[in-house]
Image (cartoon, helix red, strand yellow):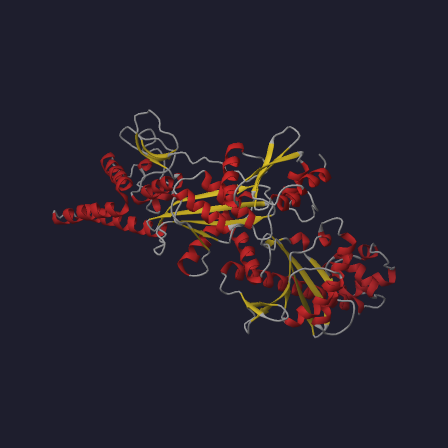
Amino acid sequence: MDIRELREKAMRLPLSPGVYIMKNKRDEIIYIGKAKALKNRVSQYFGSQNNHPEKVKQMVLNVDHFDYILCGSEFEALVLECSLIKQHKPKYNILLKDDKGYSYIRISSGEWKRISHVMQKADDGAEYLGPYMSAWYSRNAVDCALKVFGLPSCSKVFPRDLKKGRPCLNYYIKQCCAPCGGKVSLKEYSERVEAAVEFLKKGDSDSVKIMTEQMNMAAERLDFELAAKLRDRISAVKRITEKQQVVAASVPEQDVIAMMTEGNDACFAVLRFSGGRLYDKEDFLLKDIGSDSDGAAERAEFIKRYYSMRSGIPPVLALDSAPEDEELIASWLSELKGKRVRLTYPQRGEQQKILEMCRRNAAEKLAQSRGHLGQELTAIDELAGLLGLSAPPVYIESYDISNLMGSENVAGMVVFKNGRPFKSAYRRFSIKGFEGQDDYASMNEVLTRRFEEYMKEKDSGEGFGCLPDLILLDGGKGQVSAVRPVLERFGLDIPLFGMVKDGSHRTRAITDEGREISITSKRQAFTLVSTIQDEVHRFAIGYHRAKRKKKALSTTLTGIEGIGEERAKALLTHFKTIDRISNAELEELLQVKGMTRPAAKAVYRSFHKKSD
């Protein structure tokens, strides 16, 4: 069917809850969804395509026909939708790879035993602890044990590599006993391994208790050397577990879920808590999923997919934003668990800090997949939240004016892409519309010229042909008011704000024409805005100084008989510096475009103070 026929069929659907099943020409299921009113929901797909995310547009292009199943309620439709998606795994639904297999901690056989994290249990004579449902937990437990008890984490094999090399950095920062350098006996090494295994089996609190008893007994026997070693191990256990432990005392059992997006890609991070402590962390990278304005649909679909393949639903889900159909999803989760499940959206305190940690994890994972840093992604996301933007500003333009009492009036434009400087897009402007000092008029002229270039180049989508997601002006309400009419004249709806400095010329706030927004409470956003403001100021004032210097150099030349503005410019273009002009021979001066012999002689005499 073509899209017109599909829409006609959709308009004949009942206004009843149900599940719709999209299929391609090969009769393969490519998408499954649920609806409160089938007619309304399905017909949306085959109407105007302008408001659909790219993923939906692609799905619609591949739809040949659809089926539907009526349900008694929207809740029944949700349950059926989850069941059918799990069964058929349609191409255009969010699908999560369930690779949550068991993991183990392996203690190798032999005299020089090694402790490691593995995903498979082998019949190799080694001792295995586990299985553990969380590979993240077992991997971190092994890392902690190795550091606390100073055991090697390298790939060297003992006794083969004993005393065959110098100790690595871990030995010098007291995280390895360095058997490779002959720094420890087999007896002491074995004692360390035994203590590490006890630590892994019994946990940090029981391990500390046992080592404390051993330390006291050693002290009573006057074995102060052993007592000191045990004391140091106890301190190491306490220090490293304090770093790794995250406590959510107010909610002992919960999952925390956050979503970060960039372009059409997204990452969901899940932190799982039990007994008030973090025991598992998972990240899910999703490519080409598209997104609605606030990600509500994506959050809803992720929650449905995630808990369709995970057991142990907690009583509380802490989310960074509300999912679509939140009450329906809460009811579905409660049905799966057999007890009430609450959805919460922390805004302050301990829970909000944990949620921010979850968001940073999602940002870091997504950023690594796209080749940049998570803190940059977090910064633009924080900035979007502060300014009330519908999406993180991936492409930011910033402008500053620089002059000296109205002379050499210039402007600088810098661009930050994905939270970092995008220097190939930087631009410089000389103010041409008037003489004198008027920063408001200068800013108006610069933005006018910038968007005139956009109108010429918009088909290219590059350089001036690319529209920013956000404009930041170095200045307050006056600069914003001066530029707002420019955007209106070109019919552009681009968020526009000024960057306000305090008395010490440090970034203090962001402003529009009616309010000031403090940014000091959001560290990543504050750092980004401060960096942008410093960079645009540096770029603008650098251009201003270069023009002043060039003018001063040009004035030096125009003071010579026969050298006007054009010849002075030609000399500087050819030789680049006054020093090179002063050292040039007469024949070299004559090679400059437009230079006559009398003029060249005048330049030569001026610098050499003697006749030709």
Residue placed furthest toward the top? 123
Whole-percent x and y of residue 105? 33, 35
Residue drawn at the location 72% of the way across and 36% of the way down = 2
Residue 612 can be seen, yes or no: no
Question: In the orientation shown, which residue stands out farthest toward the left?
Answer: 221
Image quadrant assignment for residue 14: top right
Front residue of this view, candidates 195 and 250: 250
Residue 145 percent coordinates (x, y): 31, 42
Q: Is residue 438 left or right of residue 348?
A: right
| Residue 348 vs residue 68, the one in the foreground | 68
Instruction: State which quarter of the image contains the C terminus.
Output: bottom right
Q: Quadrant of the N terminus?
A: top right
Question: Can you say whether 167 is above or below 455 in the image?
Answer: above
Image coordinates of residue 266 in percent, x first then y, are 55, 45
Residue at the spot 59% in from the left edge and 70% down from the top edge? 515
Q: Position of residue 119 (x, y in %)?
A: 39, 32
Give the side of residue 423 with respect to residue 361, left or right.
right
Picture quadrant where residue 413 is located: bottom right
Q: Is 401 situated above or below 239?
A: below
For this rendering, which residue is in front, 161 or 144? 144
Total tally of numbered discs in the picture: 0
Q: Quadrant of residue 185?
A: top left
As drawn, is 356 to the left or to the right of 388? left
Image vertical order of residue 300 relative to residue 563, above or below = above
Q: Judge whether residue 342 can be spotted in this image.
A: yes
